[in-house]
């Protein structure tokens, strides 16, 4: 756990007190700021967050991640109060797939099963047959009959990764994440030259050339588990740098090196949306019981089915 200053300790005490009073639970994604990861009751990748949401007993859930994660929680737990510390925490990948345009895309490809990555709006999920995350997409696609025609959206990188592993020709929506497309393959290769024994860990939202030099490609949870279980001591990591916090906590004797972006001298690559959440905003959300995540009932009803299908298939 990171060293806390007095103001941070005070905020943490307030959060813990409010959490008890509200009978609330705090969920956080691995890309959250370290101090939020440290205070969360549950921390995980998108799949773990959805699985946990489906089983929670507390009436109030604070989702520290981005908006689609809070929406997924609200869809799975409509009776609960779902709070998101900063509702401006969006996702460039989800934004790359507006529902009206996706609907037209589906209409242009009749007879296709629609698979959507969890990084989508509730409205896109409502148009979907099966939701997937980076942690189960390959397994779910493989489970479908080989001749089943599939539309996969919105991430073209995850989609082409699955196409390459399965030999399928899923029709891909042309979307991407601005963070994962920024990693520099040249800088990663240079790090590998400097640390020849290091394993390269890559999220499947990265581009093909980045995945081509990976030793392991997988969701944040897969990369973290690999680092924990591996006998190797050094890892070069190409996913949002928040994950390094859990990697370093879990494996204090190992070295994790972030792959820098290609267009900046900064050493690591952060998702500005994920980093909008702060301890202060988390405290305010519990104190004010706001901002609340709402999904209109008709959309939520249609979006729930493909999420539940995912949970039952993974
Ligand atoms: P994971 O499900 O692998 O945690 O990924 C979520 C995400 O937003 C990746 O950018
Ligand atoms: Fe969305 Fe990319 Fe941020 Fe993940 S890292 S939440 S895909 S913008």
Image (spheres, rainbow, N blue to C red):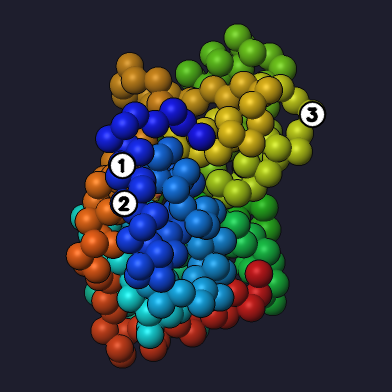
Choose between 314 and 276: the one closer to the eye.
276
**Of the numbered discs in the image, which one, if any, rests on residue 43?**
none
Q: For this view, does 166 lie left or right of residue 78?
A: right
Sequence-wise, which precedes: disc 3 or disc 2?
A: 2
Labels 1, 3: front one: 1
Q: Is mark 1 within 8 Å of ligand 2?
A: no
Q: Is mark 3 within 8 Å of ligand 1?
A: no
Sequence-wise, which precedes: disc 1 or disc 3?
A: 1
Q: Which residue is mark 3?
A: 231
For label 3, the crowd category at 10 Å Cα-Cα, with few meaning under 14, some 14 to 19 and many 20 or more, is few
Q: Which residue is mark 2?
A: 14
Most extreme residue toward the right is 231
Q: Quadrant of residue 95?
A: bottom left
Q: Residue at x 32, y 84 (%)?
A: 299
Labels 3, 2: front one: 2
Tell me if I can see residue 150 in this picture.
no
For label 2, the crowd category at 10 Å Cα-Cα, with few meaning under 14, some 14 to 19 and many 20 or more, is some
- Residue contact between numbered discs 1 and 2, judged by CB atoms under 8 Å: yes
**Real-space Cα separation, disc 1 to disc 2, in angstroms:** 6 Å
Q: Which residue is mark 1?
A: 10
Mark 1: secondary structure: helix
Residue 79 position, x and y percent, is 38, 85
Mark 2: secondary structure: helix
Q: Please, is residue 86 above or below residue 255 in the view? A: below
Residue 174 position, x and y percent, is 37, 55
Q: Is mark 2 within 8 Å of ligand 2?
A: no
């Amino acid at each position: 756990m990171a060293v806390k200053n007095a103001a941070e300790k005070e905020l943490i005490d307030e959060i813990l007190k409010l959490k008890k009073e509200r009978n609330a639970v705090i969920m956080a994604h691995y890309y959250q700021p370290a101090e939020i990861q440290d205070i969360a009751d549950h921390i995980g990748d998108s799949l773990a967050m959805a699985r946990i949401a489906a089983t929670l007993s507390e009436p109030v859930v604070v989702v520290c991640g981005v908006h689609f994660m809070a929406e997924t929680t609200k869809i799975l737990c409509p009776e609960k109060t779902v709070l998101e510390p900063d509702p401006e925490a969006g996702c460039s990948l989800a934004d790359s797939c507006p529902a009206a345009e996706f609907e037209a895309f589906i209409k242009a490809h009749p007879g296709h099963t629609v698979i959507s990555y969890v990084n989508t709006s509730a409205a896109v999920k409502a148009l979907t047959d099966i939701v997937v995350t980076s942690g189960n997409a390959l397994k779910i696609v493989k489970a479908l009959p080989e001749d089943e025609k599939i539309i996969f959206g919105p991430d073209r990188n995850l989609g082409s990764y699955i196409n390459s592993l399965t030999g399928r020709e899923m029709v891909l929506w042309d979307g991407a994440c601005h963070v994962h497309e920024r990693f520099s393959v040249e800088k990663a290769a240079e790090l590998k030259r400097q640390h020849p024994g290091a394993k390269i860990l890559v999220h499947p939202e990265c581009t093909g050339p980045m995945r081509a030099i990976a030793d392991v490609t997988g969701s944040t949870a897969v990369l973290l588990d690999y680092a924990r279980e591996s006998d190797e001591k050094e890892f070069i990591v190409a996913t949002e740098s928040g994950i390094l916090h859990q990697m370093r906590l879990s494996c204090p004797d190992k070295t994790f090196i972030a792959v820098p972006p290609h267009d900046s001298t900064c050493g690591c690559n952060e998702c500005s949306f994920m980093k909008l959440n702060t301890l202060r905003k988390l405290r305010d959300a519990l104190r004010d019981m706001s901002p609340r995540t709402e999904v209109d009932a008709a959309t939520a009803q249609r979006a729930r089915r493909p999420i539940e299908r995912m949970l039952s298939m993974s």
